[in-house]
Image (cartoon, rainbow, N blue to C red):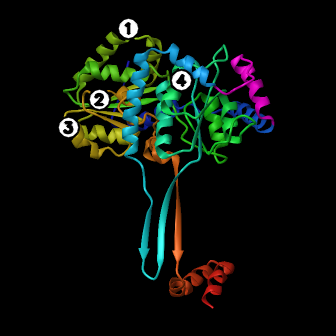
Amino acid sequence: MLKLYNLDEKGRELLLKELKERAEDTNEQIVETVSKVLKDVLERGDSALREYTEKFDKVKMEDFQVSKEEIEECFKKVDKEFINNLKEAKVNIEYYHKAQIGHGFVLNKERGVFLGQRVLPLETVGVYVPGGTAAYPSSVLMNVIPAKVAGVEEIIMVTPPDKDGGINPYIGVAAEISGIDKIYKVGGAQAIGALAYGTETIKKVDKIVGPGNIFVATAKKLVFGKVDIDMIAGPSEILIIADENADASYVAADLMSQAEHDILASSILVTTSEKLYKEVEKEIEKQIETLERKEIIKKSLINHGKVIICKSIDECIEISNMVAPEHLELMVANSMELLGKVKHAGSVFLGYNTAEPIGDYFGGTNHVLPTSGTAKFFSALSVDSFVKKSSFLYYSEEAIKADGEKIINIANKEGLTAHANSIKVRLK
């Protein structure tokens, strides 16, 4: 199922071209539709939310906010083992993200000059959580916990109502465990509009995070600037670098773990062993028949599954750095030694046993990652995603007298005489 690529220049160009084309582009019709929804929410608030919820979700809603009683019902519907698993995952995620907490600083120069930086949490954050078949409680933890660790004052969640006007119980449980302050049953582009502009019921936020379909992603693009957003995520992807000692059954399983997300998902094997590649193909054929989403996996692997045979592991890493994958598995003997050579990857999984799903659910690192080659300049969601940095400066009378003429000279050269004057009046 995996398409074999050459390592020559033409082969590399083809690989990058196909990866780029795999990402879904936003067409003009979707932009037009979403723009209308956003404008409507801006102008009519809750009234627009009710209309769109009835139109798209087929549910009439009077009160959007999820009550404490509804959350209690969610816990009754979810088995205790799952609840305990989520709580333990929360501990691991908190442990990792607490190490990311940044601190301000003060620099004391001569003549009474102080320079510094403050690290301040955002006040309000909105988390979009898909409903229906795309309901992922793990994503609730990954989006909310870093914000809580950062010190965000209020975190609001929006999620589509189910057919009975309720909330997915697994999402409700995850929201309570992760520490959400308020939950509203509204989804789609209209929910993004509510978070970006505010309505009679839903408070305007400073930043919106969380995954969604093409309409949600487009809405996030369009409101960026009114609020901050996390990123525009493309289809999921994994690149596995495997040496001759890698277990073919592990490699095959890990490639398919990403392929089951979406028919557009990309699974790439980069290896020094042609023998391993052939064994992996056999393992895929064997394992795929046991998997519930095998039709999606097949389409994904046939259209976007790839394999590249390299002469050395260094060459494998060169290919990986060129692709800049969302998930990178180093399924090699000396994975820790090679980590330093990896320049571009959303998250790296080291060794034969570290399957990517460990990071998705339990290990502690974040699974909200840059896709489509954007790992070259974007980072995983983290505590840094929920803080802002503000500088401060203090000049004494002695300091302004020492530096004043230099500042005046620079201001005058730029033609900004009022800037120069604000210094001059202090030198008199």
Which residue matches tag 3?
334
158 falls in the magenta region: no
Q: Which mark is residue 289?
A: 1
**From what the image shows, is residue 157 above or below residue 416?**
above
For label 1, the crowd category at 10 Å Cα-Cα, with few meaning under 14, some 14 to 19 and many 20 or more, is few
Q: Name the one closer to the observer, 335 or 96.
A: 96
Q: Which residues are magenta?
A: 44-66
Q: Residues within 10 Å of mark 2 (few under 14, many from 20)?
A: some
Whole-number angstrom distance, CA of label 4 to CA of label 3: 39 Å
Measured in 3D between alpha carbons, the distance from the residue under mark 4 to the one under mark 1, in whole angstroms, is 30 Å
Image position, residue 116 (x, y; %): 47, 66
Please indicate whether residue 173 sits to the left or right of residue 216 in the image: left
**Looking at the picture, which amino acid does disc 2 mark?**
Thr
The mark nearer the N terminus, 4 or 3, is 4
Q: Residue at x 20, y 37 (%)?
A: 334
Q: For mark 4, does the 10 Å Cα neighbourhood hold few (<14), some (14 to 19), or many (20 or more) residues?
A: many
Q: Which quadrant does the C terminus fall into? A: bottom right
Q: Which residue is mark 4?
A: 171
Mark 4 is on which residue type? Ile
Q: Amino acid at mark 3?
A: Asn
Residue 418, quarter of the rendered image: bottom right
Q: CA distance from mark 4 to mark 2?
A: 27 Å
Taking depth in this image into account, of 112 and 45 the one nearest to the observer is 112
